[in-house]
Amino acid sequence: MRGEQQRAAPPRIRRGSEQPPHVRRAAKPSTPTYQPLRLTARGAITGIVAVSLVSTLISVWSGAPIVSGLGFFVASVFAAFFTRVKDLLPMCVCPPVAYLGGALVALALTSAGGDEGARSALLSLMMLLAGAAPWLFFGTSAVLVIAVFRGLPRQIGRFRADLRKDRS
């Protein structure tokens, strides 16, 4: 038997397995799980500015002032739902300012140039803000209510704790 080669025993196969144990198996692809869209505070605020810009442009060109306020309201509610919980605090304080930014850009794009154009744009902005005031109020209120149910008080508590830690 010395001259003969010894044969290796075939690898043992685990019960219920089709491949030998030393063969690595690729991970089975799992079914994709639903992961909701989550925005940072910057992304949510940018979305509000963009929707405010577009809705204000549509409002100015169509002569329907309700479009601007409704666009702000819808964008704010979506932002409140889709912002990450840890970014709720900065997102909650910015919607009115984001609307103002979008409205300013829209009115700057639609106004005529020169001194009369600046006066016209300022008057248009005042009229737009006066017409959109209820939408701004209800949109900001809706953001705060949604954020409270999503965890805003906990974020405020963490913010206060961080401020206390920095003082000491």
Image (cartoon, rainbow, N blue to C red):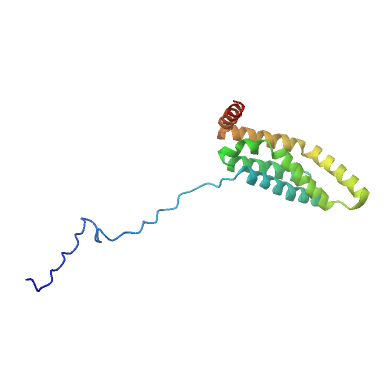
Rendered location of residue 18, percent (x, y): 25, 61
Quadrant in the picture for the C terminus: top right
> Can residue 66 be seen from the camera position used here?
no
Residue placed most toward the observer, 5 or 98: 5
Q: Which residue occupies 35% across, 59% down?
A: 26
Q: Horizontal and vertical percent for residue 103?
A: 77, 45
**Where on the picture, by quarter, is residue 7?**
bottom left
| Rendered location of residue 162, percent (x, y) | 58, 30
**Between residues 107 and 162, which one lies in front from this camera angle?**
162
- The one nearer the camera, 160 or 51, is 160
Evaluate whether residue 102 shows in this view. yes
The part of the image, by quadrant, that contains residue 17 is bottom left
On the rendered image, what quadrant is the N terminus found in? bottom left
Residue shown at 8%/71% (left/top)? 2
Above or below residue 14? Residue 142 is above
Please give the name of the residue rendered at 80% of the width and 51% of the height, measured from the top-left corner: 62
Location of residue 100 with respect to 5 vertically, above or below: above
Answer with the quarter of the image where residue 153 lies.
top right
Residue at 64% across / 40% down in the picture? Answer: 77
Relative side of 84 to 71, left or right:
left
Horizontal side, residue 21 vs residue 159: left or right = left
Residue 73: image location, x then y, percent: 69, 41
* Residue situated furthest left in the rendering: 1
